[in-house]
Image (cartoon, helix red, strand yellow):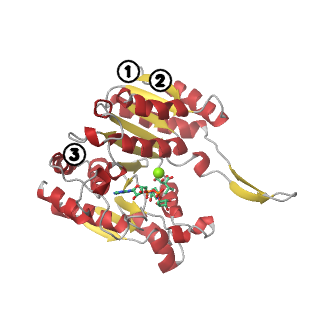
Amino acid sequence: MKIAVFAGDGIGPEVTQEAVRVLKALGLPGLELVEGDVGGAAWRKHGHPLPEATLEIARAADAILFGAVGDFECDGLERHLRPEQAILGLRKELGLFANLRPARVFAGLESHSALRPEVAGAIDLLIVRELNGDVYFGEKGIDDLPGGGRRGWDMMSYTDAEVRRIAHVGFKAAQGRNGKLCSVDKANVLETSQVWRDTVIEVAAEYPDVELSHMYVDNAAMQLVKNPGAFDVIVTGNLFGDILSDQASMCVGSIGLLASASMAVGTKGLYEPIHGSAPDIAGKGLANPMATILSAAMLLRHSFGLEAEAARIEAAVAKALADGIFGGDLGGSYGTAAIGDAVLERL
Ligand SMILES: NC(=O)c1ccc[n+]([C@@H]2O[C@H](COP(=O)([O-])OP(=O)(O)OC[C@H]3O[C@@H](n4cnc5c(N)ncnc54)[C@H](O)[C@@H]3O)[C@@H](O)[C@H]2O)c1
Ligand SMILES: CC(C)[C@H](C(=O)O)[C@@H](O)C(=O)O
Ligand SMILES: [Mg+2]
């Protein structure tokens, strides 16, 4: 089992290191870890955020563990050289179109949510975010206007084929959970969303056992804090899924807890926390590595079918949280390495 490890920028290397310690502690036969440069770190070393050598490592690996990219010192670079292009490039190059972002409240964390404990306690949802299309990958530009001033523009689009394949992922995920799928769009305003909604309805005919509902994204943002327990699986586009998943993280307690899997056709996947490089706390040993450790669990489950090992990691994280092992993001004083130690002790 060959796993590429791309730590990246900011807290990326700090949190990835803890997840790697956990993977190594499982004593998995044939485990091979290959490191590669991504993001601002790669740009500094090689002049590109996603060097060809890194892409080759990614292509040769069975799965990828990704930390985070993002470096405010690179924000003045041309867009194709910015750190974020590393993760966007990997998603596109590897065809990772289905992003699974589960959010559930760990026992004992109800009172750490930004919501009231009785509201937060009911959260157990999965956001299925389309990852290869939408306004993220359309043509874009900045025009100088004839009369002075500038106009920035980004083309948003979805083909019905793109919607169909992510809709299937959403319906299948709902079948494996509580049988409810909520498709989130903005069909009252956007033609992109009209195609989205029409296509999801068409695909629904193949899944009579799944209860399908539709919600506009503004209402979904509101319902996510009003009654998040009502959601089972949410399927949505790239941009809406990005925003709603950060919101969901605070509903369960912290962005330092939310893991994700980005899947292509087959078992190859990229696994990363949903958070970024957190420049405000980088280099201080303050980041919560649990989201990355939980991403490693998703890696074992989705790319290698190692359900027992994945569950073992998740149980160790749950136990650490139940025992009050909280990082600063949850109002505690445990640092990155101490949280890693605590999870390892409970494996
Ligand atoms: N997939 C990725 O690599 C990814 C994801 C999101 C943002 N980014 C990039 O990261 C950089 C910073 O972006 P941002 O500040 O908007 O988002 P961020 O997720 O990096 O940080 C937002 C806030 O959450 C906190 N936080 C994030 N992860 C944490 C953790 N594990 N433990 C404790 N606190 C944590 C940060 O300290 C910060 O206050 C930008 O360059 C952005 O483009 C990258
Ligand atoms: C860094 C950025 C490109 C990325 C996204 O917008 O998809 C991030 O916010 C995420 O959630 O993974
Ligand atoms: Mg995001």
Q: Position of residue 332 (x, y in %)?
A: 24, 54
The residue under label 1 is which amino acid type?
A: Asp
Query: Label 2 CB, ligand 3: below 8 Å?
Result: no
Residue ranking furthest to the left? 345
Which mark identifies residue 171?
Answer: none
The N terminus appears in which quarter of the rendering? Answer: bottom left
Residue ranking furthest to the right? 147
> In which of the image's four quarters is ligand 1 placed?
bottom left
Report how far apart the C-alphas of labels 2 and 3 lie in the structure.
30 Å
Viewed as shown, does residue 88 lie left or right of 100? right
Does 155 appear above or below 74? above
**Dot 3 alpha-carbon crowd within 10 angstroms: few under 14, some 14 to 19, many 20 or more:** some
The front one of 330 and 90 is 330
Q: Which residue is mark 3?
A: 307
Which of pointers 2 and 3 lies earlier in the amino acid sequence? 2
Viewed as shown, does residue 93 lie left or right of 143? left
Q: Position of residue 194 (x, y in %)?
A: 62, 30
Q: Which residue is mark 1?
A: 209
The front one of 160 and 144 is 144
Helix, strand, or loop for circle 1?
loop
The residue under label 2 is which amino acid type?
A: Ser
Report how far apart the C-alphas of labels 1 and 3 lie in the structure.
25 Å
Q: Which residue is mark 2?
A: 213
Q: Nearer the viewer, mark 2 or mark 3?
A: 2
Residue drawn 49% across and 44% down?
A: 243
Q: Position of residue 286 (x, y in %)?
A: 30, 63
Viewed as shown, does residue 159 lie left or right of 103? right
Report how far apart the C-alphas of labels 1 and 2 lie in the structure.
13 Å
Residue 26 in sight from this viewpoint: no
Residue drawn 61% across and 39% down?
A: 159
Helix, strand, or loop for circle 3?
helix
